[in-house]
Amino acid sequence: MVSITLTSVSVEFPVFNAASRSLKNRVLSVATGGAIDRRGDGHVIVRGLENVSLSLKEGDRIGLVGHNGAGKTTLLRVLSGIYRPTSGSAVVHGECVSLINISLGIDPEATGRENIKLRAAMMGMRPEQLREQFDEIAEFTGLGEFLDMPFRTYSSGMQLRLAFSTSTSIRPEILVMDEWLSTGDEDFKHKADKRLREIVDTTKILVLASHSRELLQKNCNRILWMEHGRVRMDGSADTVIPAYFG
Ligand SMILES: Nc1ncnc2c1ncn2[C@@H]1O[C@H](COP(=O)(O)OP(=O)(O)OP(=O)(O)O)[C@@H](O)[C@H]1O
């Protein structure tokens, strides 16, 4: 059974060169950022997540919302094993793939074709699976002869096409992503939307951080509203989306 359980998870980032004297009077009345605190030893920390407990089960299509710095990326990183909680525990049952890093596995000097292989390998795709899917991935990029040019010669939209096409060729049980995947030119966006839909339909648990009401409405059935590293609201998309977007 695929599931994710977080119990009292906190993630703290020590900051060694903060102008700490000016932090004394910080109040949490501003919407952005996690809590800034000073530990007993005088060191300043930023709390990316504070005491988050969650249980995600099969069929959950979670949307993460919250202002800048609310803790969405930090939570995605905990779910995909990039960060370990400073305290508390995160237990993930199931194969989890995260699409939160557009530059994962990319070598700017290598060609597009080589980079498809590098990135696929970094995502854990097996060689025989890659051989089977390579032509389809290359075709989906729509990059034609540019696939034989070094990646550094690509525009940002072309880089995105390559990363998107490669990343979305796998079908994990748990998919953790943010909204970089939803950008690109109109032409590609249409193709990408359809591809995204297929992935969303086949994964058992989806966690998507986004500032786009439309994207969340289309893909999510449960929304977590993060604020200052805590969960402010957790409920159905119908309830939380109107509450957050106002
Ligand atoms: N490497 C780091 N060092 C110090 N503080 C960090 C680090 N990464 C994140 N933070 C802090 O943790 C808090 C949560 O950041 P996070 O990136 O999770 O926010 P977010 O909700 O993804 O924001 P956004 O919508 O802007 O992407 C912020 O206050 C941020 O300053």
Image: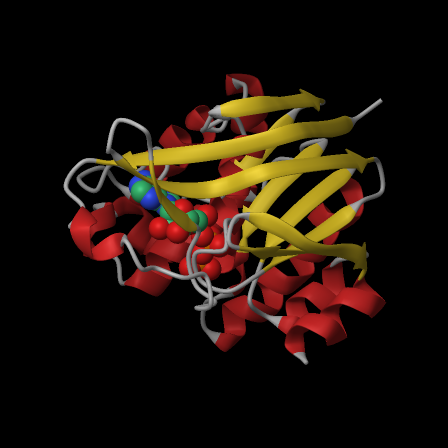
213 or 74: which is nearer to us? 74
Residue 166 placed where, x, y %? 49, 42
Residue 155 appearing in the image: yes
Residue 139 appearing in the image: no
Q: Quadrant of residue 161?
A: bottom left
Residue 76 placed where, x, y %? 54, 41
Write the residue at 77% across / 28% down.
3
Q: Above or below — where is 150 with respect to 146?
A: above
**Quadrant placement of the C terminus:** bottom right
Residue 4 placed where, x, y %? 72, 29
In the drawing, does residue 154 fall left or right of residue 58? left
Q: Above or below — where is 86 with respect to 170?
A: above
Q: Above or below — where is 73 with respect to 122?
A: below
56 or 21: which is nearer to us? 21
92 or 197: which is nearer to us? 92
Which residue occupies the extreme bottom position in the image?
A: 246
Write the residue at 69% across / 35% down.
53
Write the residue at 40% across / 56% down.
160
In the drawing, does residue 179 fall left or right of residue 149? right
In the drawing, does residue 29 fall left or right of residue 108? right
180 or 73: which is nearer to us? 73
In the drawing, does residue 138 fall left or right of residue 22? right
Residue 171 placed where, x, y %? 67, 35
